[in-house]
Image (spheres, grey):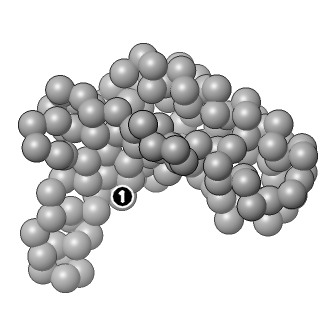
Amino acid sequence: MLSYGFKKALNLPFEKTIKKVTAELKKEGFGVLTEIDVKEVLKKKLDVDFPRYRILGACNPPNAYKSLQAEEDIGLMLPCNVIIYEKGENTVVSVIKPTAAMGMISNPELREIAETVEEKLKRVFESL
C-alpha cells in the first residue's frame, strides 16, 4: 500500500478489472465521468508502445457538491483519478487517499469530506 494512496494488484484480466472497479465504485455512490486510455493516447500522439493503462475519473456527486460549496477552487482536485494498469501477470489498481490530497488545503470542512470519501474508497479496495 502507498502512504499516499490505496494500491492493489489483482490476478484478473485488464478489462474485467475495469468492470469490477467501476461496479464497486458505483456501489459506493461514484460514477465514472471520464476514461483515458493512456496506451492509445501515447500511441496516437507519440507513436510509442506502452502497456495497457487506464485513468478513470470517478466522482461521488454529493461529496463533490459539498466540496465545491466549501471551496470553489477544489475543482482543481476533482474528480478522483483511479488508475488501472498491467504489471507482469497482474492488473494493478491505485487511487490517491483524499486526505493526502487535501493535506495542502487548510479548510477543515474539506478535511471532513475527504475522510468520508476516503472511507468509501477504502471499502471499494477491500471489495476488490
Give percent across and percent down for residue 65. Answer: 79, 44
Left or right: where does residue 41 sit relative to residue 108?
Answer: left
Vertical relation: 69 (above or below) 24: below
Left or right: where does residue 23 sit relative to residue 99?
Answer: left
User: Does the image show residue 33?
Assistant: no
Q: Which of 23 and 109 is in front in this view?
A: 109
Q: Nearer the viewer, residue 94 or 28?
A: 94
Residue at the bottom extreme of this rendering: 46
Vertical relation: 39 (above or below) 113: below
User: Does the image show residue 123?
Assistant: yes
Kind of residue indicated by mark 1: Ile
> How many numbered marks does the figure carry?
1
User: Image point 15% across, 57% down: which residue?
Assistant: 51
Q: Nearer the viewer, residue 32 or 80?
A: 80
| Residue at the spot of label 1 | 36
User: Image point 15% across, 64% down: which residue?
Assistant: 50
Q: Nearer the viewer, residue 64 or 10?
A: 10
User: Image point 69% across, 44% down: which residue?
Assistant: 99
